[in-house]
Amino acid sequence: MSVEELELGEVVDLVRRERRLAEDVLRRVHPRDLPHVLLRLPPGDRRRVISLLPEDAVRSLLVEAPSELVVEALEAIGVEEVARHIASLPLDEACDVLRKLPPHERRVVAERLPEGFRGELEPLLAHSMDTVGALMVTKVPAFNGRLRVGEAVEEFIARVRAGDYYTDHYVYVVDDGGRLIGYLSSSELMASPREARLAEVARRPVKTVSPSASREEAAMIMARYDLMELPVVDEHGRLLGVVVFDDAADVLLDRHAGDLERFGGFTREVKAPYLAARVKTLIEKRALCLIALCLLEALTVNVISMFERVISAVVALSFFIPLLCDIGGNSGSQTASFVIRSLATGDVDVHDALRVAAKEAAVSLGLGSLGLGLILSPVLFALGYAITRSLQVATLLAVVVVVVVFVASMVGGLLPLISAKLGLDPAASSAPLITTIVLPSVA
């Protein structure tokens, strides 16, 4: 054997040993944890590890990983392998994986899919990513209402054993035209009289949703009515599929993460996990907000400059400007966070603006013993006197803090409602924006 052949053999043996080691180790990692492990590796090592993953781990990675990792998996194992893995997934998961790919790569991979499977995917891919149509699963138990329970049970069991359904918690009942009549749980189906017809034992659906509705709307409906599944029907009432609870939970989690980013001052949501996000992307999505806030701060500078003589006469006042600004910003952010959460859960809407304003006025002005303004006022009085030894400065601080908290609470409470009324995202009422608006009240 030549030196070249010997070296090649050693390399093959090494790769095989590493493959067995990788399979042994990675089988112990939960599929949802695998992306977190890979994101902590350098890009080159990441692709190498992906190429060593066992097939079941690759499929889990494609489903669970962010788009950046899916693209790297495509580069590591090739188009043919990715297409083969996608073809083995349920339709809704296969659709999600394809949507993670850039348009060109998506077309290339789709062309490698089996023709029949690709034909089933096309209706799902036609829906916008933010709609229920892209979220729903279509392989659900649905039987004609004229069918007897005994016949439905036999067919249901046979198809469950064959793995034909993505979810089998509920059985849906439709008429001859495919229009939804009702539903019943699988346990209710088994307990129903065998001679009864499905239409006689089915319950009317609590809620339905159209495929063009937003994913957030469907998730909120399921959360409000404690639904495990939400039927999706077209304009004629025909059953198209259902939204399942775990997908709805993911939508709410994504929305919460997006709201936090926008509230922190991001102009657009960062889809990628932090470790996978490109530095350029983070700069682009943060810079615009910072520039806008900088320009707004210039107005505050002008307002403060108008009181130059007062500040020069009582220099000690300038010591407390940062303190008052922080108090106002924190108070407004607290209020905004609570109102945004209440808007998200449906506890308040834009028509409750007066109620929100009245409540925040009561809290901020210190009506009652728990008023925030009257708690902070004596604290600022004592702090001001301890630092400056001036009753004039201490009294002024005690009064100003009540005004600052009042203005900040009103801005923080009403700004999300105004945003919602204008059709904007209430979470865009970011903490930095509230602080910037409140600053002139300090002056």
Image (cartoon, helix red, strand yellow):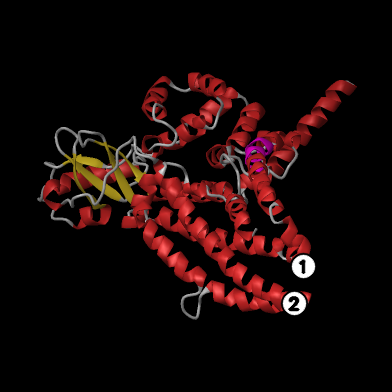
Residue 88: x percent and y percent?
47, 33
The amino acid at mark 2 is: Ser
Report the span colored magenta: 282-290
- Residue on which the image places disc 2: 390
Residue 245: x percent and y percent?
39, 50
Regarding mark 2 in the picture, which secondary structure is present there? loop
In the rendered view, does 282 fall on the left or right side of 355? right
Q: Quadrant of residue 208?
A: top left
User: In what quadrant of the picture does the C terminus appear?
Assistant: bottom right
Residue beneath the point at 72% across and 74% down = 384
- Residue on which the image places disc 1: 316
Q: Is residue 130 above or below residue 263?
A: above
User: In what quadrant of the picture does the N terminus appear?
Assistant: top right
Residue beneath the point at 37% across and 42% down = 166
Q: Is tag 2's residue or tag 1's residue first in the polypeptide sequence?
A: 1
Q: Are marks 2 and 1 in contact (CB under 8 Å)?
A: yes
Asked if the magenta segment contains residue 286, the reply would be yes
In the rendered view, does 179 fall on the left or right side of 42? left
The amino acid at mark 1 is: Ala
Residue beneath the point at 52% across and 62% down = 409
Q: Is residue 336 above or below residue 24?
A: below
Residue 313: x percent and y percent?
77, 64
